[in-house]
Image (spheres, rainbow, N blue to C red):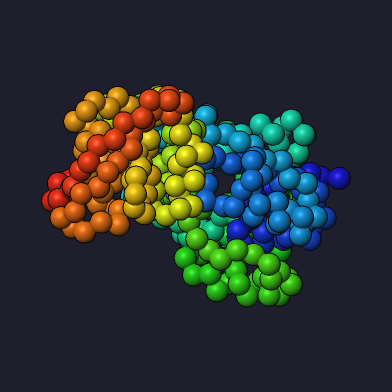
Amino acid sequence: MIKAVALLSGGLDSILAVKLILEQGIEIEAVNFLTVFCTCTARGKTCLASKSAADNLGVKLKVFEVSQEYFQIIKNPKYGYGRNINPCLDCRIFMFKKAGQYMREIRASFLITGEVLGERPMSQRMDAMRIIEKESGLEGFIVRPLCAKLMEPTMPEKEGVINREKLLSIQGRSRKPQIQLANELGIHDYPCPAGGCLLTDKGFADRMRDLMKHNPDFTVHDIKLLKVGRHFRLSPSNKLIVGRDEKENEKLLALAEEGDLHISPVDVAGPIGIGKGYFGDDHINLASRILARYSDIPADGYLEIECYKITEKHRSHITVTAIREEDFSALRI
């Protein structure tokens, strides 16, 4: 039996693409590429959206955690960034190369993707798709069932492995054709369309740029911290992260490392702060004043703050007033 590898995000487009090819009697194994930037619900090394889709479709799923390799693409993308810090073309090339390697490993004949011509402005233009195919070394072996009739026939179509007449010509950003097709195929369990990558989010992108500037050798742990709390750049050598609520306070405590600065209010309700980098007395005072800004005290009141380094026994207390709005805003990342 002919076998294909499908890139399965778990979104509607990829689900429909797999379904259309399954109906032509092709055996499919799905792959998903997970990074620390994914916004899909994940536990450990499993993307729950793609796992649910694979289970419903009755196909095997192989998940690759590729965060470390992906960092190099973010730092120096050949084709640049989108509106924020999203290297979409380089990302697609990277994923297709990986999928192509796996395709050859399991002796599959071609790849399937749910891409729709014109749906995404950076990576789903005709010229962009051709660049991705060429750079990944997969020209003629990427089948896009949802928009195939708008493109040149692929090798599986030319060889009669796939019936081109049963493929579609969907184009543009409207989701109506896909939703109608899903209803016709009896597919009702799929996630709402939304961006699946934090790198497309402006707020996160600003934090990511700051991290890359001040800590170019960042780690997965550093990225996890970017997802939590309010971030403040106090100097080139340190930053402060302040929890927004009790749940985020707990996350920050769980992510805190040996040597990090821990600050918290003593007698009133308020957030905790975690300091990364070297903190002298002046920066401890500044961090404490930022914390006071979010604590339950009058605007002109005083707040006692406890400060200590994680894993160290020595603790100190200082009393501060809340930072002024104009000073506070300039430090927020």
Residue 190, how many percent across, how many down?
64, 64
Taking the image as drawn, is residue 263 in sight? yes
* Left-right relation of 261 to 115: left
Residue 333, how many percent across, how many down?
28, 44
Q: Residue furthest front?
A: 267
Residue 199, how many percent across, how many down?
42, 46
Q: Nearer the viewer, residue 299 or 287?
A: 299
Residue 205, how many percent across, how many down?
35, 45
In the image, residue 194 sits, relative to residue 225, either above or below, namely below
Residue shown at 48%/36% (left/top)? 255
Location of residue 20 (image quadrant) = bottom right
User: Is the N terminus in the top left, top right, bottom left or bottom right quadrant?
Assistant: top right
Residue shown at 34%/49% (left/top)? 267
Q: Nearer the viewer, residue 214 or 132?
A: 214
In the image, residue 222 sits, relative to residue 141, either above or below, namely above
Residue shown at 22%/41% (left/top)? 319
In the image, residue 191 sits, relative to residue 64, either above or below, namely below
Q: Nearer the viewer, residue 327 or 163?
A: 327
Question: How many numbered tags mark residues here?
Answer: 0
Residue shown at 69%/34% (left/top)? 102
* Left-right relation of 226 to 317: right
Taking the image as drawn, is residue 93 in sight? no
* Left-right relation of 166 to 178: right
